[in-house]
Image (cartoon, grey):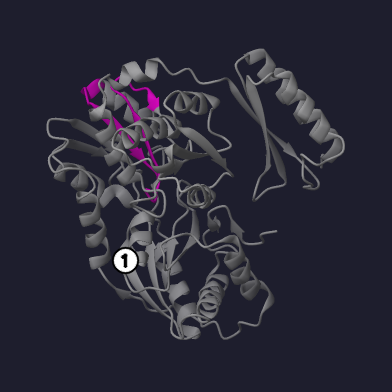
Amino acid sequence: MKRLFGTDGIRGEAGVAPLDPATVRRFGAALATVLGGAAAAPRVLLGRDTRESGPWLRDAVAAGLASQGGSAVDAGVITTPGLAFGTSSGRFDAGVMISASHNPFGDNGLKVFGRDGMKLPDAQEAEIERWILDHDLSDAGSGAGRAAEDGAIARRYVAFLEGAVPEGRFRGRRLLLDCANGSASALGAEIFRHHGAEVEAIGDRPDGRNINLGCGSLHLERLAERVRAGGFDLGLGFDGDADRCLAVDRTGRVVDGDHILYLTARKLKRDGLLHGDGVVATIMSNFWLEKRLADEGIRLHRSAVGDKYVLEKMIAEDAALGGEQSGHVIFRDRMTTGDGLLTGLVLLDAILDEQTPLETILDGIVPFPQKLVNVRVASKPDLRSHPVIGPAVAQAESDLHGTGRIVLRYSGTESLARVMVEAEDPAAVERVTAEVADLIRRELGA
């Protein structure tokens, strides 16, 4: 059972445990200790998004690292995938991204990447937790540490993105970017202009407190309105650390992660780059995606929720493409984590490759009705093995006759069971969701 790490690192309110200065220094010390088994003086790359708490959190991590013989290099404000790219392409033993992704500015977080640019496996996160919580790290440093600045990290990442699609590929296309007042603010427009697009940007004036505030991939309303009114060919919305990308078409209709997986999978298959003819999505992706990919001769593999679990499944299935509805999309032959800017580039490239306009493609996609209900629980036994819940859910799935599915999972951070039902028949969705949720509430309710 995780005690500090959630599905995407350690996250919470900046300044409050576990993101208070003392605990963050202990985190840095624990990370250096765990890394010390392979590197006597571990070098760690630090990056951050635009939150006002980022600099002091960086200094606290650096102090903890130094207390155990480690050193820190500061990549500055950078995207999460940029930090992962810098970690794997430089001589670093690990990377720490200081970001709470799509959360409000008052939150922050610590995401750890290994020297391969991949998020740490659960076992290694648990080892860091044990050092933070169960060991004497009274010598974890005090005050602020120092990290040597290196602006070349971001420049190398930009050069990588500039080579992601053919030169001049987007010439004559008009794009609107919503950078969420986050990490993409300084990079997004530059990269798409490099490829020939005419670009306007919103949400590109961060002040430390406006990250994700009514903008970005979680708030696409303004982007959609501006795309419609301005006659743009496409709108792209990123989140605070730019590891997600969602889009809107000319009509302002949202293009979610499932749509992006579908379009980019078709492109990779046409180009002979979809090895294994498989794509990974989470258990939350809509059933329409599975059916439409099957029509294209592409198998959908499902993973647990969280992009690190998507990547683990991609490696197990040797898949080149995977992602989540939220816009975390991983192109494994190019990047070790979800990359919003890369996703935007590949998506637009795929759209231009289609013989049919994007709007027409979207018109032909009808998502299955889907409902998600949270049930507060007092304990978290395996739901499928529960003597009462398990058989009832199996019977409900049988009654759907292959036209729907039931997804059960627990929240990683709260005492909640999540019940998601999806089926062709909306009435069946409502009925089955209510029945399963009520049963869990009776059996396990807090």
Q: Residue at the spot x=22%, y=24% of the render?
A: 230
Q: Is residue 383 left or right of residue 251?
A: right
Residue that badge 1 annotates = 89
Q: Residue at the spot x=71%, y=40% of the render?
A: 417
Q: Between residue 28 and residue 318, name the one nearer to us.
A: 318
Residue 242 lies in the magenta-colored region:
yes
Q: Is residue 383 left or right of residue 97?
A: right
Picture quarter with the C terminus: top right
Q: Amino acid at mark 1?
A: Ser
Q: Relative to residue 133, is residue 335 depicted above or below?
A: above
Q: Would residue 206 be visible to someone looking at this image?
A: no
Q: Between residue 188 and residue 353, name the one nearer to us.
A: 353
Residue 196 lies in the magenta-colored region:
no
Magenta segment range? Answer: 229-254
Crowding at dot 1, Cα within 10 Å, few <14 / some 14-19 / many 20+, comes out as: some
Q: Report x, y in % for residue 306.
A: 54, 47
Q: Would residue 86 be visible to someone looking at this image?
A: yes
| Occupied quadrant, residue 140 | bottom right
| Occupied quadrant, residue 216 | top left
Q: Relative to residue 399, is residue 268 depicted above or below?
A: below
Q: Report x, y in % for residue 315.
A: 48, 52
